[in-house]
Image (spheres, rainbow, N blue to C red):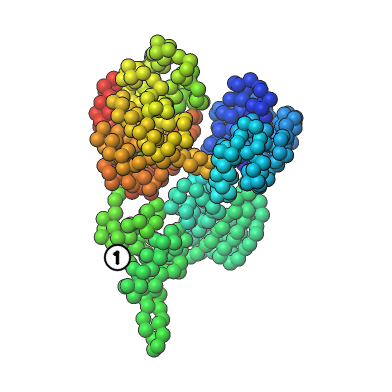
Amino acid sequence: MTNLEIAKLIRKVAAAYTVMGENFFKIQAYDKAADSIEHATSEVKDLFESGRLDKLPGVGEHIKNYLVELFKKGRVKHFEEVMGKLPKGMFEILDVPGIGPKTAYKIAKELGVSSVSGLKEAAASGRLARIPGLGSKTSQEILKGIDEVTRRGSRMLLPYAWNLANDIVTSLKKSPDILEAYSLGSLRRTVATIGDIDIAASTNDPLKAINFFIKLPQVERVTDKGEHKATVVMKNGKQVDFMVTSPERFGALLQHFTGSKMHNIHLRKLANEKGLSLSEYGISKVHEKGNQFASDLLAKCENEEEFYKILGMDYVPPELREDAGEIERAVAHKLPKLVELKDIKGDLHVHSSFNTQTSHDLGANSLRELAEHAKNQGYEYIAIADHNPSVSGHTQAQVEWLLAKRLKLIEQINSSRGIKLLNSLEVDILADGTLAVQDKILSGLDLVVASVHSSFGQGVDAMTKRVMKALRNPNVDILGHPTGRLIGSREGYELHWEKIFKVCQKKQKALEINAWPERLDLPDTLVREAITNGVKLVISTDAHAKDQMDNMRFGVAVARRGWATKTDILNCFSWVDFSKYFRIKSKE
């Protein structure tokens, strides 16, 4: 089973417990375990087989024992017993946005619905709206959710596709017959969601390279094999296409199959104006031969730099190849130098296991563990942006006491670890635009990340007013995951972005590029608009476990697709410049 499949199974058990009225903390433990497994940087089955299941953060011993049973027997008796007490159909519709465990149970019990298609029929026929407590409005929302699930299909989120492809590429490079290997298509361009995975390699022996690929331990079965191409289904169920070519043609093939389609169409037009023809085999010179046109190979193109140089252009990074002005800029030799992972000096949105008594999830690692991991990453600083204490359950004095206790630990670490931990919070933006923590407390923090975590259904005018009110608070530094989207499960809320950009630029507020796999938020198109409007950005991981800080590369990928340079990204600043920008005095 893949990590995603295991996470879904555990969420189903949590849903069953919810319907059955189980202990809240037990349900929370299952939800937290599912999140940890889904976002793990290694396959959980691999951890089990190598005896390293104890390295999986955020999963209690009880659930780990169930995982051992799952991998040994292919089933968990306790899970089957729990889920068997409820209608089977409820578990088939839990993925539909807007349907929680109790609603799923009610629908499955009263209508006998056992699939998404059955749910759609029930909603369309009006039967769903007649269930007490639902009504026509809820029925319409569920129909929208079904459309989202249908559109989602089987596409993978960028980080999961990247990890899968990277694992294959790493294995391929162990062969002496494979000289280079890269992913292709939307994955190489780091688009937020990916379909099937395509990989290309250069080799002097195509047959040996193909045979090496199809015999990889990750391969379940071969569906097609030719002299220069093979298609397989991996053990996790994903299809991978593999193609090979000679080293002298590798650049042309890499460019051709990286795309995008519109980028390549524009390139062909440019080439035609120069009397050239482009293909995956190289660049040819076109000339008249009698009444017909013929072509002679001009260059095979060993690398992409050579390919673009022949066209009179600078090399275009894969992330920019969307026909969004990059070709014109490359011809004029005016492409920006894009931000790189090595430019990042710190992570500004990390959650620790310190108990702030929040209604949101805690992190899995201690402050010291996070500091050590950040130091090993080569960072100069990280912001401990734990969720604020729950609004309803704490007085100002209680919040102050909790944060003072955490600050004491932060100061101890800062005096000994050789890295700056910032005293920060991720604070809820409430429905009216006020913040969930009093200004007196916020003013004592090094950095404040303000985020929307509720009331997503507000209209564009109300939501814009709400976010702008938060941004005008002098204590707020960063707007976290600015659109609120969860890729594949929740559309982002709408904002009047020209107004948001204006207040950010005027008040010196930064927008976050959140690297959490389901978020990748701010999206790349808005990143570019923000930069054009003079707005500064930060790239943060929203990590709830130290290994999730490795997701920074995907935030950088979004920034690169948005044409960002390191001067656009505040956490590319050295500690000296960063602390001056945010007027952080306590640790200078």
Q: Position of residue 155 (x, y in %)?
A: 55, 49
Residue at image location 48% in from the left, 51% down from the top: 187
Q: Can residue 84 be seen in this view?
A: yes
Residue at image location 41% in from the left, 69% down from the top: 278
Q: Position of residue 576 (x, y in %)?
A: 26, 29
**Image side of residue 314 versus residue 322, left or right:** left
Q: Is residue 514 visible?
A: no
**On the rendered image, what quadrant is the N terminus found in?**
top right
Residue at image location 40% in from the left, 65% down from the top: 265
**Image side of residue 505 versus residue 135, left or right:** left
Q: In which quarter of the image is residue 527?
A: top left
**On the rendered image, what quadrant is the C terminus found in?**
top left
Q: Where is residue 447 in the image (x, y as percent from the top left)?
A: 34, 26
237 above or below 253? above
Q: Which residue lies furthest to the bottom in this view?
A: 290
Front residue of 128/185: it is 128
Front residue of 36/534: it is 534
Which amino acid type corresponds to the residue marked 1 in the rendered image? Gly
The residue indicated by pointer 1 is 312
Residue at image location 35% in from the left, 73% down from the top: 272
Q: Position of residue 126 (x, y in %)?
A: 64, 43
